[in-house]
Image: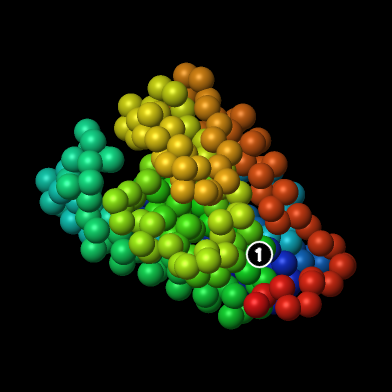
Amino acid sequence: GEFSRRSGRASGEATHIHGYRSPWIGRQASNNSPLPSCQYQHELTPEQWRRMNKFSETKFIFPNAPSIPITVNMGMRMPGWYDISDIGDLANRSSEDEPGILRSQKVFHALIAEEIASGIPTERIVLGGFSQGGAMSLLAGITCPTKLGGIFGLSSYLLLRDKVQSLVPAESPNKGTGIFMGHGDSDPIVRYEWGQQTAAKLQEWGWKVDFRTYAGLVHSAAPQEIDDLEKYLMEKIPEVGDKPLAAGSGS
């Protein structure tokens, strides 16, 4: 994706991933503090995301998915984190693109490692996304070897359900990391019951999941959902102002 390295101070980071392309632009405020200016090119419009300016200390990263052949698109290349061969049943384990999913998992973990290396405390990093990006964020989040501040998936579902537990590190540092999930009950693409089943399965495995239902919402995001996500982010990565970050918080 496209993002600028700013000289100002960033105490937190939110990586938001969509199934396709999610560019953003960072700019420097006059007082040299990091002020993200995000341009999101899909369901989450600039109008809905205008309130993200509240996160004056947060660096937002919107990575682009690579261009790959997509089976349901007659094999034509388009941005995707993994191939989809059956749009009618995304939760079908036999048709999952496991190599592509694991490849993208490594990409996400590398992005997180890069930000940790730049000085961002691990517990102030949030990973999340929408649709395919949300599914990848859930997988990469629960299998991440380092502590995260938060994990969220909007209109998403669980990938590699039959083996994902084997990918979770022993004594996972994120079992206590609250996961936010939002889903419309009229979604015709990523079915509502898939989201419900994902939340139930994660809870069964010991994860803390806050699953929110949005009545009448199709495969998109709603203002109330964005409000709920905003509250979640403000809880997970509150602004610290001039207060120093806790010693050793990046370990």
Kindly identify the residue that appears in the image at 55 percent across and 42 percent down: 209
Kindly identify the residue that appears in the image at 58 percent across and 80 percent down: 117
Between 81 and 203, the residue placed more toward the observer is: 203
- The quarter of the image holding the C terminus is bottom right
What colour scheme does the image use?
rainbow
Between 39 and 93, the residue placed more toward the observer is: 93
Kindly state the secondary structure of the residue where label 1 is placed: helix
Which image quarter: residue 50? top right
Kindly identify the residue that appears in the image at 38 percent across and 57 percent down: 165
Between 219 and 78, the residue placed more toward the observer is: 219
Q: Amino acid at mark 1?
A: Glu
For disc 1, the neighbor class at 10 Å (few under 14, some 14 to 19, many from 20) is: many
- Seen in the picture, residue 60 relative to 46 is either above or below; the reply is below
User: Residue lying furthest left in this view?
Assistant: 74
Which image quarter: residue 223? top right
The number of callouts visible is 1
Instruction: Give how far across and how far down residue 77 sits, in percent.
Output: 20, 55
**In the image: residue 173, left or right of residue 80:** right
- Seen in the picture, residue 59 relative to 233 is either above or below; the reply is below
**In the image: residue 172, left or right of residue 94:** right
Any part of residue 55 in sight: yes
**In the image: residue 153, left or right of residue 4:** left
Kindly identify the residue that appears in the image at 49 percent across and 58 percent down: 141
- Seen in the picture, residue 89 relative to 95 is either above or below; the reply is above
User: Residue lying furthest top in this view?
Assistant: 216
User: Residue lying furthest right in this view?
Assistant: 242
Q: Residue under circle 1?
A: 123
Instruction: Give how far across and how far down residue 244 sits, in percent.
Output: 84, 72
Any part of residue 42 in sight: no
Instruction: Give how far across and how far down residue 154 sits, in percent.
Output: 48, 41
**In the image: residue 235, left or right of residue 87:** right
Instruction: Give how far across and how far down residue 45 sits, in percent.
Output: 53, 40
